[in-house]
Image (cartoon, rainbow, N blue to C red):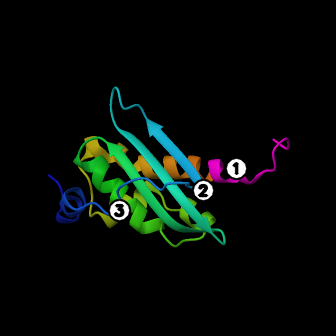
Amino acid sequence: MYTEKVLEHFFQPKNVGRIENADGVGTVGDPSCGDYLRLSIKVEQERIADIRFEVYGCPAAIATSSIFTEMVKGKRLEEALNVSDVDIVEFLGGLPDPKIHCSNLGALALRRAIEDYQLRRVPQGMH
C-alpha cells in the first residue's frame, strides 16, 4: 500500500516540532475532523533557514509533511512555493489514490506561513 520512502518518513519523520519565535506560521485543516498541519518557518536572506511541522493525521499526512519540509529547507521563498503536491508524490514513489490529498497540505501551509512572514515584516499601521 505505501512505498518504502513513505514508511521511512512515517516512522522517522524529519523536522517535527515547533519553532519558537518563528518568522511565519501557517496552518491547514481542522484537527477535530481530519488532517491538520501546522508549519513554522525561520527565514534568513529570503531563504527557509529552518522549518518544523506538527501534524495530526494518517501515515500519509505525516510522511508527506516530513518529506515536504526536507524538500523546501534551504530554498529561496519563491523556489519553495514552486514545490507542488505532484513533486511530493513523485519523490515518495506514489501514494494510494485516497491519500493523494495529503500531499496538498504542505504546500498550502507553507503558502500561509510565508504570507504570515510577509505580514509580520510590514511596519505597524501600514496594513
Q: Residue at x 18, y 58 (%)?
A: 11
Q: Find numbered disc 3 in the image and state the secondary structure of the residue it sits on.
A: helix
State which region is magenta: 115-127
Mark 3 sits on what residue? 67
- Residue 88 in the image: x percent, y percent? 38, 60
> Was residue 124 drawn as part of the magenta stretch in this picture?
yes
Label 2 sits on what residue type? Asp
Q: Nearer the N terminus, badge 1 or badge 3?
A: 3
- Which amino acid lies under the numbered mark 3 shown in the image of this protein? Ile
At mark 1, the secondary structure is helix
Nearer to us in this view, 58 or 126: 126
Relative side of 116 to 50, left or right: right
- Residues under numbered marks 2 and 3 in contact, where contact means CB atoms less than 8 Å apart: no
How far is mark 1 from mark 3, CA to CA? 27 Å
Amino acid type assigned to the residue bearing label 1 in the image: Arg
SS at mark 2 in the image: loop
